[in-house]
Amino acid sequence: MARGMTLEDMAVLSTPFGVSNAHALARAGISRRRLDQLVRRNELVRLRPGWFATIDANAWVVAAVKLGGHLSGLHRLKLLHKDIWLPAQAQMHLHVNTTLPVDPAAPHRLVRTHTHPRYNRTVLQHGVVPPVAALRHGLNDVSMPETVAVVDSLLRHATLRPGNRARPHLDLHVSTVDVIAELRRTPRGRAVLALVDAQAESGLESIARVLLALAGHQVEAQVLLDNRQRIDLVIDGVLAIELNGGTHRDAERFRRDHEKDLAVERAGYVSARYTYHQILYQWPEVYRDILSRLARA
């Protein structure tokens, strides 16, 4: 426990992301005098007037509040679960009040700001917007395959129950119902919805699947073999693609991969295997290889 902090302080300050506004802390029973004491002892950090963070608070939320806003977009969605796909090129999104301008020192080419939907300070009390608003703000950030990867991962970890509309600041999860309803609002969202597959097991699989589907191929995901193993993707009924997400394969992993490749070939497929780097950064070369294998199949 931090020096000088009571158990009551710790319980109140154990917010989901380590950030709270003074209004929420006052309602929880921490006085302004107590806040000042904790700041003087370096047990709390004053991010801006009326906003405080614990020493180990989430860095993205801290940065958003310091800039004068509340975290939104794909970075906010990533906070829902460690396996939510976050594209490397995603921008930081801030939700701001019209009366509270973003810090003029902010690198604006890397930060996008939003003033809608309008929320009161209770909804925004932990420095983040509700998940559905974050999805709305971040939906156009990246390419269609990467956007589908985000939504696939969201749906994979979504709850079945709709969010708490009466107390949206308590939504630490997002529901399938709310994600689908949000996507149906816009042409972009409906295009994403037509391509999603909540059974996808990784963002890499989602990206490869969508790239191939958009190129006109028939793509089946997680195809079951007789030995109960699953093929990541089967293209046009003949080419079995396995995707290696990691950068390092030890001897045991290499052996398992080789055995699976043999099982794939025994099942009558042509096999191919590609890495994370190849799918994300060398797609033209990968696609030429896929076309070549399909032509020989």
Image (cartoon, grey):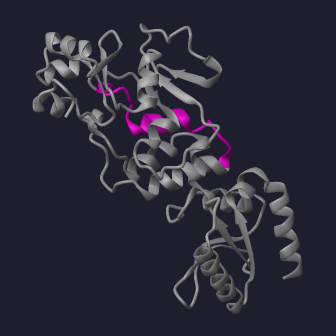
State the image quarter where residue 168 is shown. Answer: top left
State the image quarter where residue 208 is shown. Answer: bottom right
Q: Is residue 250 left or right of residue 160?
A: right
Q: Is residue 71 above or below residue 247?
A: above
Q: Is residue 196 left or right of residue 14?
A: right
Q: Quadrant of the N terminus?
A: top left
State the image quarter where residue 292 is shown. Answer: bottom right
Q: Is residue 199 above or below residue 260?
A: above
Residue 50 magenta-highlighted: no
Residue 121 visible somewhere in the drawing = no
The span shown in magenta is: 123-144
x and y percent of residue 233 in the render? 65, 71
Relative depth, front residue between 116 and 205: 205
Relative depth, front residue between 273 and 134: 273
Residue 143 magenta-highlighted: yes
Residue 128 visible somewhere in the drawing = yes
x and y percent of residue 216 in the render? 77, 63
Q: Residue furthest front?
A: 3
Residue at the image position 50 percent from the left and 54 percent from the top: 153
Relative depth, front residue between 44 and 201: 44
Residue at the image position 65 percent from the left and 88 percent from the top: 263
Q: Quadrant of the C terminus?
A: bottom right
